[in-house]
Image (cartoon, rainbow, N blue to C red):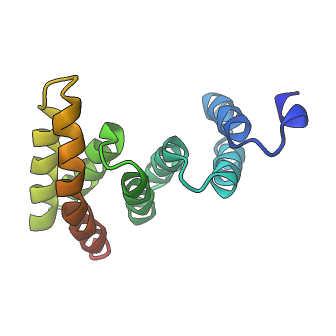
Amino acid sequence: MALQLAPGAATTHFNLANLLVKQHAYDEAMAHYSEALRLDPVFVEAHCNIASLLLETGRTKDAAAHYVAALQTKADHLPAIVSLAWIYATASSEAGSQHATEAVRWRSKPAGSQAASKAECSIRSPLLMRMRDDFRTL
């Protein structure tokens, strides 16, 4: 019903995809997450949910690309930081270990330190670029 009322709304496709995941209809969910991204290319949560589905199917490199895309939009998105760090850490590479350590450091920041978080976003950009380049070698 919601899809009939708002077929062009990214959040409608995103919410439907979330329901489909709960029903284990992963292919359909992926199609709706992808449509949400087509409608809103900077939809961070859609990137992360696509990445999670890709990880479930063993498509690690594709999942990493979606986490990187999410972080390019919102550099302090903790679920994407931690998930990308996990991918790197399990890849057994030196770069992966460094990125995983950085994610743990970011995670240990006190909650509510908005000023520190905003300041770190500019610092993280070069690291995110290295992460993007490093994931290509996985």
* Camera-side residue of 31 and 13: 13
Give x and y (percent) for residue 56.
46, 47
Give x and y (percent) for residue 100.
15, 50
> Could you tell me which quadrant the C terminus lies in?
bottom left
- On the picture, is 124 further left or further right than 18? left
Residue 93 visible, this orientation: no
Q: Which residue lies furthest to the top in this view?
A: 111
Residue drawn where x is 22% and y is 55% of the image: 122
- On the picture, is 124 further left or further right than 49? left
Give x and y (percent) for residue 61.
39, 65
* Camera-side residue of 137 and 99: 99
Residue drawn where x is 28% and y is 54% of the image: 87
Q: In this view, does 134 lie above or below 106?
A: below
Residue drawn where x is 43% and y is 51% of the image: 55
- What is the number of callouts on the image? 0
Give x and y (percent) for residue 52.
46, 45
Residue drawn where x is 59% and y is 56% of the image: 41
Residue 44 visible, this orientation: yes
